[in-house]
Image (tube, helix red, strand yellow):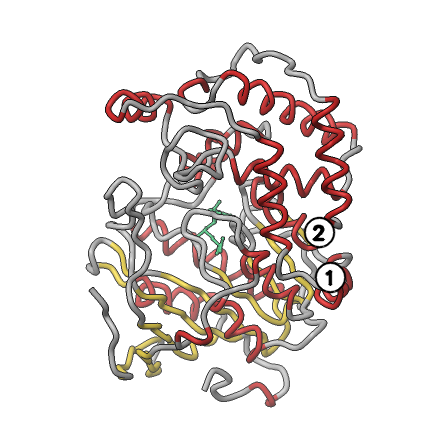
Amino acid sequence: MKTRAETKVDWLEVAGRRIPRVWRELWPARQRGGHSLHEISYRACFKAELPRFFLRRMSRPGDLVLDPFMGRGTTLIEAALLGRVPCGNDLNPLARILCEPRLDPPEESEVEERLSLYRRDLVDPGPDADEPDLEVFYHPVTLGLLRALRSRFLEGEKSGSLDRTDRWLRMIATNRLSGHSPGFFSVRTMPPNQAVSIETQRKLNERRGLRPEPKDVLDLMARKSRSLRRGLDAEVLEGLRRVAARARFLTEDAAALESLPDASVRLVVTSPPFLDVVDYAKDNWLRCWFNGFDAEAIGRRLSTPSRLGEWIGKMMEVFRALVRVLLPGGWVVFEVGEVRGGKIRLEESILPAAAAAGLEPVSVLVNLQEFTKTSNCWGVENNRKGTNTNRLVLLRKPGGLGSREGRPWG
Ligand SMILES: C[S@@+](CC[C@H](N)C(=O)[O-])C[C@H]1O[C@@H](n2cnc3c(N)ncnc32)[C@H](O)[C@@H]1O
């Protein structure tokens, strides 16, 4: 069912001030859609039009733009496409693996040559002692090639010998590991941003009579590479390379950001975990295995508390870190959701914490548009606990020049 609503405004009381909450469609259909480079899936990622809307209005080319919870790096890719300098942070090192190669894509000829070399040279090293039972997802021949790719990437990472083409192909292989269509390496399963457990896949295979077929892994990688590159021309590549050399990637707690200098960031566009609605470590376990990361250990460090008070406390620490790294007058766009079936409105919870941390609450924008976040590959709505609106909390660090005052989104 479509939920398209008229523009309306209500008011929130925050620290003795009235803050408008504006409900409207922020980006009409003709402004939706993103560059092909964005097409790397990630659980609870936002769409390119969200950071684009604010990047255009609240930053200029050359400005440093930060996402402290970067995920697949939607903010960073869009910032780079618009000539801003991207800076991203995520406690899961997978985020950098998925984002960094797209700031400096190799030429198509480099990709083809490298895939031919892989086809000639890669040898299955056999399973590690602790390899999970991956044959529920892959045909033995496919699994052999995946192990060979994995060990090439892990060894290259250790010795520092991976070049941009290897990193691009590692990102693509990570993205193609499992999914619901023939373009993925696995038997039919859930979408790629949500790997199911081995036990669940075993049951799915039994119930649906599925058996992993051999896949031409390198050919599927070549196709995905072409598809990601289809929006790239010489001008876009040149623009990306100009900012890629200055891009920054951190793997810290978003409340730390210790390696970022004070007063350096013009704009933050970000989306934290919404309480415990998504289990980022579990959904990414297969991608973590492929890249040699311990998903459980990462999961224990992520900020996904079930209790609202604990979540607010954590976000307050994040706001304090943002106040330090922002330029005076710099902006924060903090996307949160309506969770627990609408009983908790995170934007209302977050505003007093932001004000207490030293950010000036400016407004809340609620983007209304039809609900499209449903995955029906198994006839299952996978976002039942989620939200169908983007709630964007706009905050500003006090000070700076007056030119960015007012309503830059208007
Ligand atoms: C909603 S997702 C961000 C998605 C992103 N906007 C995108 O478009 O892909 C939240 C991210 O926060 C990360 N995360 C959770 N707790 C964190 C913390 N304390 N510090 C840094 N990153 C954290 C998770 O690993 C996850 O990638």
The picture places residue 197, in percent across and down from the top left corner, at 37, 27
Q: Label 2: how many residues lie within 10 Å, few (<14), some (14-19) or many (20+)? A: many
**Foreground residue among 29 and 230:** 230
- Residue at x 43%, y 71% (from the top left corner): 355
Up/down of 410 relative to 45, above or below:
below
The picture places residue 336, in percent across and down from the top left corner, at 37, 61
Up/down of 83 relative to 296, above or below:
below
Q: Which amino acid does label 2 sit on?
A: Pro
The picture places residue 68, in percent across and down from the top left corner, at 55, 55
Q: What residue type is labelled 1?
A: Leu
Image quadrant occupied by the N terminus: bottom left
Ligand 1 within 8 angstroms of badge 2 C-beta: no
Up/down of 390 relative to 376, above or below:
below
Q: Do the residues labelled 2 and 1 touch (CB within 8 Å)?
A: yes
Ligand 1 within 8 angstroms of badge 1 C-beta: no
Image quadrant occupied by the C terminus: bottom left
- Residue at x 27%, y 40% (from the top left corner): 378
The picture places residue 15, in percent across and down from the top left corner, at 36, 76
94 with respect to 285 (left or right): right
Q: Which mark is residue 276?
A: none
Res 166 quadrant in image: top right
Q: Which mark is residue 237?
A: 1
* Label 2 residue SS: loop
* Label 1 residue SS: helix
Dot 2 corresponds to which residue? 105
